[in-house]
């Protein structure tokens, strides 16, 4: 099926921001890449900021995480399997969007305030979705007391740091088998800090 105008504009925005960065990807360039006029772009989305927001909502990890957690029943017997599935999906999504991740992390401080807000809200919402899963497991008595939001940030932070070091700094191509082992290691470390019954060093 041929992509509709909205889809073409979003795909063009993703491509050009990944290649040029937000500031250098002009609405004129985006419209040309999508095969439409600049007037059509503004009629459909209103602004480049709105286009960027829709790209973040559609092409990043957040929608995939929501889909995974909505189908969590197949992993419901194993906290470790859930975290492993989330970790692998997160790393693979970062890898798929490597160009966008690389340019966003290097340029975010020079972007307009509105764009930084959109990007920050996306990160916060991603943490909130995983925090909701942790909270549900706490209510079931599986996990000890801790801040779900902080735990979500720690979990994603481990994996993002690994991705940035291996794929961006070292320019390595982490393959599926190696990734599986890396995530298993992270999950093992993380699980021992969150499962109920593990020693609490601060009480």
Image: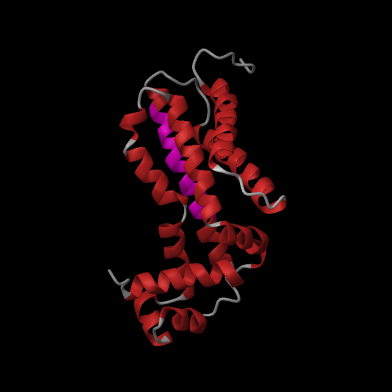
Residue 103: percent from left, percent from top: 62, 63
Residue at the left extreme, as displayed: 1
Q: Taking 168 as reference, is 133 left or right?
A: left
Q: In this view, does 134 lie to the left or right of 203?
A: left
Q: How many labels does the image show?
A: 0
Q: Nearer the viewer, residue 104 or 88?
A: 88
- Residue toward you, 203 or 141: 141
Range of magenta residues: 120-136
Q: Where is residue 72 in the image (x, y as percent from the top left)?
A: 34, 34
The percent position of residue 117, horizontal first and vertical second, equals 54, 60
Q: Name the one closer to the observer, 133 or 201.
A: 133
Horizontal and vertical percent position of residue 93: 50, 50
Q: Which residue is drawn at 59% across and 37% down?
A: 178
When asked about the image quadrant of residue 136, the answer is top left
Farthest right residue in view: 170
Instruction: Please tell me in which quadrant of the rendered image residue 102 appears.
Output: bottom right
Question: As displayed, is residue 48 above or below residue 194?
Answer: below
The quarter in which the N terminus is drawn is: bottom left
Task: Report whether residue 50 is seen.
Answer: no
Q: Does the magenta stretch include residue 154?
A: no
Figure colour scheme: secondary structure
Q: In which quarter of the image is the C terminus?
A: top right
| Residue ID at (63%, 18%) | 202
Does the magenta segment cover residue 125? yes
The answer to whether residue 151 is above or below residue 203 is below
- The structure residue drawn at horizontal position 54% and vertical position 51%, both measured from the top left corner, is 94
Residue nearest the viewer, comparing 136 with 77: 77
Residue 88 visible somewhere in the drawing: yes
Q: Residue at x 72, y 50 (%)?
A: 170
Q: Main secondary structure of the magenta part?
A: helix
Establish if 188 lies above or below 48.
above
């Amino acid at each position: 099926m041929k992509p509709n105008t909205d889809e073409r504009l979003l795909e063009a925005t993703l491509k050009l921001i990944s290649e040029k960065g937000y500031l250098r990807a002009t609405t004129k360039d985006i419209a040309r890449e999508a095969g439409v006029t600049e007037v059509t772009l503004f009629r459909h989305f209103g602004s480049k900021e709105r286009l960027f927001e829709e790209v973040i909502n559609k092409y990043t990890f957040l929608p995939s995480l929501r889909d995974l957690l909505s189908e969590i029943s197949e992993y419901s017997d194993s906290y470790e399997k859930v975290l492993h599935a989330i970790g692998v999906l997160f790393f693979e999504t970062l890898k798929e969007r490597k160009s966008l991740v690389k340019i966003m992390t290097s340029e975010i401080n020079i972007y307009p305030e509105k764009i930084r807000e959109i990007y920050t809200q996306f990160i916060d919402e991603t943490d909130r979705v995983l925090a909701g899963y942790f909270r549900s497991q706490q209510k079931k008595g599986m996990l000890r007391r801790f801040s779900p939001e902080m735990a979500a940030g720690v979990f994603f932070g481990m994996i993002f740091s690994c991705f940035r070091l291996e794929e961006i700094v070292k320019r390595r191509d982490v393959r599926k088998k190696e990734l599986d082992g890396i995530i298993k290691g992270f999950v093992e470390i993380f699980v021992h800090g969150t499962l109920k019954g593990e020693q609490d060093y601060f009480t």
